Amino acid sequence: MDSANQSTFDSDILQEVMNIAFGAAAAELSELIDIFVRMEVPVIKILELDNLKTDSFYTVFGRGRYSVVKQDYWGDFQGSALLVFPEGRGTDLITILNGAPPGDDTQVSISNVEDGVLLELGNILIGACVAKICELLKTVVSFRPPTVKSGIGTDGSIFDSLGDSSQYAIVMKTTFEFSERNVEGSIVIVTSDVSMSWLDKALHGFLESF
Amino acid sequence: MRILIVDDSPIARMILKKILPKDINLDIEEAEGWKDAQDLFREFKPQLTFLDLTMPEKNGLEVLEEFLKISPDARVVVVSADRQKQVIAQCMELGCLAFLPKPPIAEKIREIIEMIGEMDREFHG
């Protein structure tokens, strides 16, 4: 992607699309588990892919160690959708999803339950968010099964799905908070610059549909 | 009819302006957030305000409260991507006229504007 393409790419439209999509995802989660999700204004960044895989990891997520649910998607636009929580909030997440903290007689370890909860939250939030983006941009994507990794610090390999042909990545990030449990997380959708020209047309198509 | 649109997103404001009815005489002002909106709200005296919720400097629920303090009869329609039932209930409790999820639908906007037009005509005889 050269600078001319970057300037034609309208991140304001993408920001509004992401805002609507995350709103739909939060509403779906709130219906399912009766929790209030506080949303922040989405942030759109265009980053060099090499940097994103190394130094810029912290630009996207901030410093710390994380539990990450990752789901790759492909179609007219392709990349990865990530649900990111600070590591070690397992008990809170289990309480959020089950309505009660894990009991002492839990047969499986907290970390296994946490992984299950993360996958379930990822299914709901990522699925609803990407589905809404697709609905607004009039396209369909396919998903690979989600995976969960805990203890991620600077592991740039989570962006490998963007492939080697991409030079830049478009990063759409929305931070949210489950306010009753004081747990903050973020949903990050990363797409490769291979999708750029399609995305640009789709975004303007979205705007022209009104 | 005087209409104020308060939304930090220029695209959201653009979409709303595009779907406002063209056959009704509308005087439209825009604000990016509370900072711009507070004076405009007092001076422009909108007959209808469209208000976003997820804004950086002051969230829409706080702005709604401020508007209703300035003018308890203000007609404020919240247009937001955040359509959780708790949020809608809060908006209605605070006194918004209606809640529309983003992206807004032209027919709904027209219905509201026509309803307000009728109310004002009845009020002024």
Image (spheres, coloured by chain):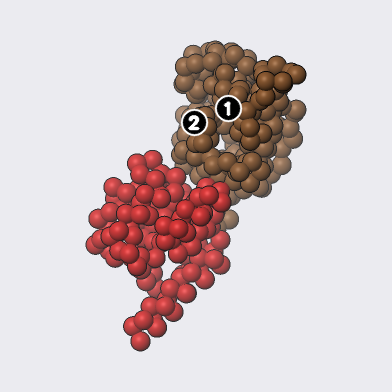
Chain colours: A brown, B red
* Residue at the spot 42% in from the left edge and 61% down from the top edge: B95
Q: How far across and down, in percent of the image, does residue B51 sit?
A: 42, 55
Residue that appears at 56% across and 48% down: B84
Q: Is residue A94 left or right of residue B91?
A: right
For disc 2, the neighbor class at 10 Å (few under 14, some 14 to 19, many from 20) is few
Specify the label residue A92 is tagged with.
1
**Residue B38 picture location, percent across and down:** 28, 54
Question: Left of A138 or right of it: where is B110?
Answer: left
Disc 2 target residue: A182
Q: CA distance from mark 1 to mark 2?
A: 9 Å
Asked if one can make out residue A21 in the rendered structure from this viewpoint, the answer is no
Q: Is residue A107 visible?
A: yes
Q: Amino acid at mark 2?
A: Asn
Rendered position, B81 above or below A101 = below
Q: Secondary structure at mark 2?
A: loop
Dot 1: within a 10 Å radius of its alpha carbon, few (fewer than 14), some, or many (20 or more) residues? many
Helix, strand or loop status at disc 1:
helix
Contact, mark 1 vs mark 2 (Cβ under 8 Å) = yes
Write the residue at 32% across / 54% down. Answer: B66
Along the viewing direction, whichever of A154 and A142 lies nearer the viewer: A154
Front residue (pair A3, A35): A35
